[in-house]
Image (cartoon, grey):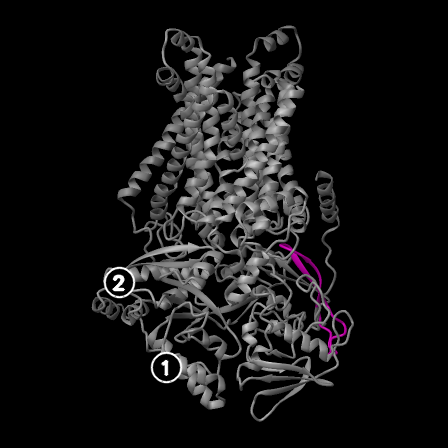
């Protein structure tokens, strides 16, 4: 297990470095000149040349990357070009919101998927179960921003129950979390259902039943434990999707999170900001991946020796 | 009724749904190639925001353009971009995946590492980065989705190759002196096919969603050409004035995605039958 | 890392539970973008001057009707040659409590015209010297300049304490409001300054500028009462508030010239007949209704009618909508099958929609138009700086003095991204800066006519500025420049 852990941790670091280098170099060949962008339509050539030097845009790429990467590791994320503020401050304000949003979405999706998935598996011939199954199928197909727009139209514009956009207390998070959780619930529910169905067919479950154990005991003690592996793997794979969804949903609801900061940064060519935001996003995705791999490794020894 | 019977029953039903939905979608797209009720880009300011009626079955938009014509025209763009991107991603993924699975060792290690790195950058994030490098448009969406799809194809291929490689008949073939290439072509690829078809269907559903999201964010398809996501973006300010402008493209996107997902399920069934010898 | 993140997460939850319950006399305003920097000599974003107008003041300031009125200078004199201005300072205080001194004024103005420091130093290059007297500041110009006084109303000519540091984040001025807190990408909190030199105290004790980038959320927030004022409403969402109870919309010309910029140096657009064909092929009525919902004034000149006194209103018949003649001109120039690219800035929905409609209209002439929508950064680099484009659309912001607007079309101007060149026009602009009164007016009328006939681009419209607000808000004043005047608002 120890060796497995070391290998995974090493892989994690290597991947992080790979991604950082890739993003940095991709962003360096942008056609839009950040110095020019900062000056707008009214700048003079002298101011432009000076600003380029100030931003050290005239240094070689590798040097800039190494400088940036060592600074990143040291927690010095530099100043945003667009806001002339420390990136750490900007990200520090935006990150918690996105993080809470994503966490709440996963949490509520898991909470909703558990009963839905079990019900669909155990009572697969009931009408309710069929409807649920249809719902999960459709839930997977709906574009998130569209669901968001419709929810705003209904709950904010027609009923005026919830805020329409922007961040104004916890009530602002209800609709975005619902929007983000919907496809997650559908995926987890379907995996759980498939997992439970698979396990129900196994001999040891039939044996446990024939021993006279009650249906519920069997379901929770034997079935769920083994059936959870599928949905857990699915949840792990889902984190990248979740982050992508967060970017879109933040845009729909005008939430001042990391996604919006990143999107603005990309459009404004605010390199220090984009770099840091992307790195954080990627680190979070990788960290979750790592955590899930380790969990799975503990649950299922076969994976360790793969 | 035991669980596998339940599965088979459901899947048989779903197969028809998936096939029907995708068939209908393709038929509409084909129709759009040759015929639309109106010129999809023809502006008629006098006739803007017409609700659906006999003349305009799905109404008109903020420039008085016929929504049905734009949906049909846009189907081509949404589907073509999705299919092209997934094909690119699949080709690269299958190639690298078979290399990883077949050669194993450090090749496998390296490719899986790259694949993990790529997996941490979702299609949308990739496309956003590209959109900043080039200007927004079809190529950005295409490459973003294509690259984003490589890891899943790589993994599916590698895992299949690994599991097939160990099967008795492959080992038998090897023992009989068959070369690497022959083993790959005769034994591994045919077995891969089913798994890849499932992945392809599911990826296509994801690609249609990703294209719509990117066009909604403004980095995807550019006007005047309509894609379904682009139509939604343009319609958003008029949601309360002309609800059909928001409802129609969203329903079409959902229809396409559900259709391809169901089709994927059909192939899962096919694969299970092969394995179980049913 | 995680420990550090935990604190803000917890803080958010506490804020959530405490939130709501706004105090009296608080005004919430929705704006789409953050300011860039509050250092007056560093900022270039219009979004900054909109907010900073209330924080900083210059020796003089702009009035809603486009004039100039005393601010930190109580009055001023000009010598007979028109090159020596003397500004007499009044007793005024900065937000930090210090009194405004002659040294502060001299330092601020010298910083603003220092090309080593100031981004727009070039605009003040007519100044020869700034000298401090006992209670006045004397500014000497190289030669008489009619635009000079108006330039002193610009944000870069603001006055701040000589020793101020970190102005970009912590502005110190003399205006009726000071910046209390800035949460980038979220909000700016302004509080009223109790010791303004005018002795008047604004009605609203606190004003929050909320950053809401999406126009739909802006409107929904206004309807929900979370925001009371949207100074610049996108016209595409006007219908959402038009008949809403409790909300009123005040429209006024923006003093913005929306135009098709044509690259005059690139064939076949170097041929005036081709440029004219583009102009005659445009149905601008349709654009006005289709893209701007009728909220705008069609323009035939490089100046907006808001520049009363200088606007040439006789140019209406120079370029009428006449597709027949347009086709003939194209035939004569041998360009019936011309294919070109129309480059549009993605962040301006009005320009994008205008471009979509125009492309359709030009295609009816038999031309082929490729739309290319680019991000603002790409637009600035490719179109504005490298001048690498065929045709584009942009809105040129209004200034108080016509010279600042018209000088951009002279051959050697660094802002002449049209590559337009006309000898007579260059002469007129040279003359205009020195002329006065009726003579100056005549010069600018002729200059406008040259632009309308020679077509560096095709002028489209001056879109209306739509200020949507809670109907209880009173005292909204619209300016020909990009500002929101908070001190005049009450309820």
Q: Residue at x 41, y 11 (%)?
A: B170
- Residue B194, given in percent of the width and then of the height, sits at 40, 21
Chain for numbered disc 1: C
The residue under label 1 is: C424
Give the vertical position of C373 relative to A224 (above or below). below
Give the vertical position of B222 relative to C175 (above or below). above
Question: Taking C22 as reference, is C426 left or right?
Answer: left
Q: Same subunit under labels 1 and 2?
A: yes
Give the vertical position of A212 relative to A147 (above or below). above
- Location of the C terminus of chain C by quadrant is bottom right
The residue under label 2 is: C365
Q: Nearer the viewer, residue C315 or A212?
A: C315
Span shown in magenta: C178-203
Q: Residue at x 46, y 56 (%)?
A: C378
- Residue C6, given in percent of the width and then of the height, sits at 73, 41
- Location of the N terminus of chain C by quadrant is top right
Whether residue B254 can be seen here: no
- Residue A132, given in percent of the width and then of the height, sits at 53, 29
Q: Secondary structure at mark 1?
A: helix
Q: Nearer the viewer, residue B267 or B123?
A: B123
For marks 1 and 2, give the CA distance.
Answer: 32 Å
């Amino acid at each position: 297990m120890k060796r497995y852990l070391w290998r995974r941790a090493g892989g994690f670091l290597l991947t992080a470095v790979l991604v950082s280098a890739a993003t940095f170099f991709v962003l360096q060949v942008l056609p839009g000149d950040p110095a020019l962008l900062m000056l707008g339509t009214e700048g003079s050539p002298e101011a432009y040349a000076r600003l380029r030097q100030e931003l050290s845009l005239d240094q070689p790429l590798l040097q800039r990357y190494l400088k940036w990467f060592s600074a990143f590791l040291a927690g010095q994320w530099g100043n945003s070009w667009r806001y002339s503020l420390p990136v750490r401050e900007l990200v520090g304000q935006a990150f918690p919101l996105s993080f809470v949003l994503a966490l709440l979405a996963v949490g509520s999706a898991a909470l909703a998927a558990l009963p839905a998935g079990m019900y669909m598996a155990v009572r697969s011939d009931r009408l309710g179960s069929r409807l649920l199954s249809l719902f999960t199928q459709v839930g997977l197909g709906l574009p998130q921003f569209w669901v968001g727009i419709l929810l705003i139209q209904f709950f904010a514009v027609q009923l005026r129950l919830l805020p329409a956009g922007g961040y104004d207390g916890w009530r602002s998070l209800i609709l975005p979390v619902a929007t983000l959780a919907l496809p997650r619930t559908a995926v987890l529910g379907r995996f759980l259902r498939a997992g439970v169905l698979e396990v129900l067919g196994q001999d040891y479950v039939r044996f446990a039943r024939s021993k006279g154990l009650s249906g519920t005991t069997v379901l929770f003690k034997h079935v769920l434990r083994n059936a959870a592996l599928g949905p857990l793997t699915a949840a792990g794979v889902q984190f990248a999707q979740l982050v992508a969804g967060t970017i879109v949903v933040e845009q729909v609801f005008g939430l001042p999170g990391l996604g919006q900061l990143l999107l603005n940064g990309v459009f404004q060519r605010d390199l220090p900001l984009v770099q840091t935001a992307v790195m954080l996003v990627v680190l979070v995705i990788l960290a979750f991946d790592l955590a899930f791999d380790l969990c799975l490794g503990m649950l299922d020894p076969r994976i360790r020796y793969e | 009724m035991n669980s596998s019977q339940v599965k088979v029953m459901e899947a048989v039903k779903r197969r028809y749904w998936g096939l029907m939905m995708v068939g209908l979608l393709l038929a509409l797209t084909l129709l759009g190639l040759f015929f639309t009720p109106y010129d999809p880009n023809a502006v008629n300011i006098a006739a803007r925001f017409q609700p659906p009626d006999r003349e305009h079955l799905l109404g008109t938009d903020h420039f008085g353009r016929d929504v049905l014509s734009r949906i049909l025209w846009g189907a081509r763009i949404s589907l073509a971009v999705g299919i092209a991107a997934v094909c690119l991603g699949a080709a690269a993924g299958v190639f690298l995946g078979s290399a990883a699975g077949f050669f194993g060792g450090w090749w496998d290690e390296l490719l899986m590492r790259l694949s993990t790195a790529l997996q941490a950058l979702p299609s949308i994030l990739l496309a956003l980065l590209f959109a900043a490098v080039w200007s927004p448009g079809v190529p950005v969406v295409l490459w973003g989705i294509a690259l984003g799809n490589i890891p899943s194809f790589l993994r599916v291929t590698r895992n299949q190759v690994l599991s097939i490689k160990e099967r008795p008949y492959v080992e038998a073939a090897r023992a009989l002196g068959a070369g690497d290439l022959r083993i790959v072509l005769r034994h591994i690829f045919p077995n891969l096919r089913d798994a890849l078809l499932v992945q392809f269907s599911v990826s296509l559903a994801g690609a249609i969603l990703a294209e719509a999201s990117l066009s909604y964010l403004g980095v995807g398809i550019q006007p005047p050409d309509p894609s379904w996501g682009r139509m939604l973006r343009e319609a958003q300010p008029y949601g309360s004035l002309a609800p059909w402008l928001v409802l129609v493209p969203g329903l079409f996107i959902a229809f396409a995605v559900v259709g391809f997902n169901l089709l994927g399920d059909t192939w899962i069934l096919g694969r299970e039958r092969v394995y179980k010898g049913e | 890392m995680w420990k550090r993140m935990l604190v803000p997460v917890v803080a958010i939850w506490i804020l959530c539970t405490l939130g709501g319950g706004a105090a009296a006399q608080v005004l919430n305003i929705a704006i789409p973008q953050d300011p860039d920097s509050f250092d007056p000599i560093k900022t270039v974003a219009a979004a900054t001057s909109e907010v900073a107008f209330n924080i900083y003041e210059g020796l003089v300031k702009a009035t809603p009707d486009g004039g100039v009125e005393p601010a930190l200078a109580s009055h001023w004199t000009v010598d007979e040659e028109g090159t020596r201005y003397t500004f007499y300072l009044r007793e005024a205080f900065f937000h930090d409590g210090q009194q405004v001194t002659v040294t502060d004024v001299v330092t601020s103005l010298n910083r603003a015209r220092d090309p080593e420091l100031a981004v727009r130093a070039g605009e003040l290059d007519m100044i020869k010297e700034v000298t401090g007297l006992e209670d006045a500041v004397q500014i000497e110009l190289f030669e008489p300049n009619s635009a000079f006084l108006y330039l002193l109303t610009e944000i870069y000519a603001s006055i701040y304490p000589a020793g101020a540091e970190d102005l970009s984040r912590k502005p110190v001025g003399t205006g009726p409001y000071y910046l209390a807190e800035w949460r980038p990408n979220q909000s700016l909190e302004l509080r009223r300054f109790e010791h303004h030199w005018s002795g008047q105290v604004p009605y609203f004790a606190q004003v929050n500028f909320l950053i809401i980038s999406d126009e739909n959320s802006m409107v929904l927030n206004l309807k929900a009462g979370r925001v009371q004022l949207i100074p610049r409403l996108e016209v595409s969402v006007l219908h959402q508030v038009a008949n809403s109870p409790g909300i009123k919309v005040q429209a006024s010309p923006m003093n913005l010239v929306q135009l098709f910029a044509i690259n005059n140096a690139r064939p076949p657009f170097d041929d005036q007949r081709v440029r004219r064909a583009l102009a005659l092929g445009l149905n601008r009525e349709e654009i006005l209704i289709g893209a701007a919902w009728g909220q705008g004034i069609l323009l035939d000149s490089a100046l907006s009618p808001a520049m009363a006194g200088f606007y040439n209103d006789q140019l209406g018949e120079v370029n009428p909508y006449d597709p027949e003649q347009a086709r003939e001109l194209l035939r004569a120039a041998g360009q019936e099958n011309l294919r070109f690219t129309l480059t549009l800035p993605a962040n301006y929905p009005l320009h994008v929609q205008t471009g979509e409609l125009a492309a359709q209209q030009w295609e009816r002439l038999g031309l082929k138009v490729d739309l290319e929508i680019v991000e603002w950064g790409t637009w600035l680099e490719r179109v504005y700086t490298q001048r690498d484009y065929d045709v584009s659309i942009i809105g040129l912001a209004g200034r108080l003095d016509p010279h600042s607007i018209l000088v951009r079309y002279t051959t050697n101007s660094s802002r002449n991204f049209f590559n337009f060149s006309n000898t007579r026009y260059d002469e007129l602009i040279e003359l205009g800066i020195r002329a006065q009164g009726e003579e100056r007016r005549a010069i600018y009328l002729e200059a406008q006519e040259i632009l309308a006939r020679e077509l560096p681009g095709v002028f489209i419209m001056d879109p209306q500025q739509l200020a949507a607000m809670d109907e209880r808000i009173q005292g909204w004043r619209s300016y020909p420049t990009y500002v929101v005047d908070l001190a005049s608002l009450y309820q």
